Image (cartoon, rainbow, N blue to C red):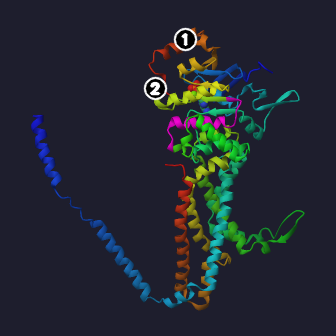
Amino acid sequence: MTGAPAIWARGVAKSFGGAPVLRDVSFDVARGSVVCVLGASGSGKTTLLRCLAQLETPERGVMGIEGELLGHVERGGALHKLPARSLALQRLRTGMVFQRFNLFGHMTALRNVMEGPVTVQGRPRAEVEREALALLDKVGLAHRAGHYPAQLSGGQQQRVAIARALALRPAAMLFDEPTSALDPESVGDVLAVMRAVAESGVTMVVVTHELAFAREVADRVLFMDGGSIAEDAPAETFFAAPGHPASRAFLAAALSRPNPSETIAP
Amino acid sequence: MTGSFSYDFAEEAERLCALPVRRRPAWGHIVSATLIVVVCAWIVRAFALGQIEWRYVGAFLFAPSILRGLGATLLMSACAMALGLVVGLGLAVGRLSSSLVPRWFSIAYIWLFRGVPVILQLLVWFNLALIFPHVGLPGLGEVRTVDVMTPFLSALLGLGLNQAAYIGEILRGGLQSIDRGQYEAAEMIGMTRGVALRRIILPQAMRVVIPPLGNEFINMIKLTSLASMIQYPEILHNAENIYYANTRVMELLIVAGFWYLMAVTVLSPLQHLLERRVSRGSL
Ligand SMILES: Nc1ncnc2c1ncn2[C@@H]1O[C@H](COP(=O)(O)OP(=O)(O)O)[C@@H](O)[C@H]1O
Ligand SMILES: [Mg+2]
């Protein structure tokens, strides 16, 4: 199976109240690679990611992660919807990092990271705690293990959220504008952690407006426009010679702005 | 011009700072406090001079049947509240469910049980034998309803199922107060809906629902007095039995009132402790 994509989608379509948001989206993500999803606000980036995370159900199309069909099982020449329990287990394979962190407010940073492995996977508490502390250390927050989310800054919360997702050893990590809700000073810390995650070989799909990050870390760029993938190219190609008029306009507009993290609204 | 202004102002400010600050006399407080004291004194006098034999109050305050009644009141409050919480949680989850049947069942239940007076519900449960003379499960045998529908069970069902309608609405508000992102984050770490509800959503909803639930519990303690109508031997029922015999009505009502007041008084600090405990993590 080497060479088979870690994540793939074919003909994915989704609409909200009759308005199409994703139209016939198809792409592959190679194992261990980083794909950045770029595009204007409202072009369907979040919806695409939420379909991969199975927080939304596409109306048409098939997706797969690490050799498994997402949300379906093939039986008797047809695809059958997975029952809720199997769906929950399948979600363990994808870690999701939300724009608004969504840490569990009643748990300390450490408990947030431990919750999945202990409650869902049923792993021994002592072993999980050691791992969770190591993960918090990796994201630079070992000294904040006992803090509640409300006592942490946005950037710190987002780094805990990354550790929480990594604690389940997912096959792929999905990021939805992880730095858009942060003040400019904490953006760098979160991007540094994401860079480290990428270097550790985890497959990543990152929706972002941080072009510098995309240019440096991404292997490929998916450029979305009006619910379709307008361009799917290696990162160098995309930034050096964007092939689609919409990508050219997007890049030109973005480069004329001084600091993307300050000027692009979530 | 600016200079002379600021010079004048500095002098003026200094003069103002040197002035003593006098409190405004709190006429409103003085008048209302006097009124309250006068009214209270008048009531106390009326009770002291009225046909109240205080030695009866003293004699029956710790009478065994009154204390048994207190126990029965507390037991019923706890049981009915527990039943109300369990059924109420089901109603809240059903009300927020995306499928039609649980949602409409919850709506209909809450409509019915909130719309009918509790005392009437108690009487219906107590007299259930008039509609269903026998109850039982097929294969497990049957019993006569009058034997099953004891005052305790009637009161428990009447009070608990009525309470469930109110608790259901309180819990629904609590569940709705939790951000959708919390559900989604729970789903992304592989939790099923039930586990997410138990581990993530409910503990956070507690912050919102503990104060109103505490009020419901306090209400419930007083509401159990209605069960005296269906022969449940709680405080008021036992006090009534005593004054039917010795005609010291007011004395025994004071005794009963004292114990309700005590039960509620002890509960309030417990509620505060609980509120503090569930608000961990909030600033
Ligand atoms: N839950 C929803 N209900 C209705 N419309 C939605 C919903 N989620 C997204 N949309 C719409 O779908 C379009 C794409 O949204 P989104 O995927 O969030 O775009 P992006 O992340 O690229 O900004 C937008 O027009 C948005 O209003
Ligand atoms: Mg978005």
Is residue A153 covered in magenta? yes
Q: Which mark is residue A48?
A: none
Quick check: B60 above or below A182?
A: below
Quick check: can you spot residue B136? yes
Quarter of the rendering occupied by the N terminus of chain A: top right
Q: Residue at x 63, y 85 (%)?
A: B64
Residue nearest the viewer, comparing A62 with B31 = A62
Label 1 element class: helix
The picture places residue B198, in percent across and down from the top left corner, at 67, 50
Residue nearest the viewer, comparing B105 with A59 = A59
Q: Quadrant of residue B38?
A: bottom left
Side of B171 relative to B130 (left or right) = left
State the residue position of label 1. Answer: A248
Quick check: can you spot residue B98? no
Q: Residues within 10 Å of mark 2 (few under 14, many from 20)?
A: few
State the residue position of label 2. Answer: A262
How far apart, in angstroms, are the residues tagged by discs 1 and 2? 21 Å
Is residue A118 covered in magenta? no
Identify the amino acid type marked 2.
Glu
| Discs 1/2, front | 2
- Label 1 residue near ligand 1, CB within 8 Å: no
Q: Residues within 10 Å of mark 1 (few under 14, many from 20)?
A: some
Q: Residue at x 79, y 68 (%)?
A: B132
Identify the amino acid type marked 1.
Arg
Label 2 element class: helix
First to last magenta residue range: A151-172
Image mark 1: chain: A
The picture places residue B46, in percent across and down from the top left corner, at 41, 85
Q: Residue at x 61, y 90 (%)?
A: B245
Q: Quadrant of residue B144?
A: bottom right
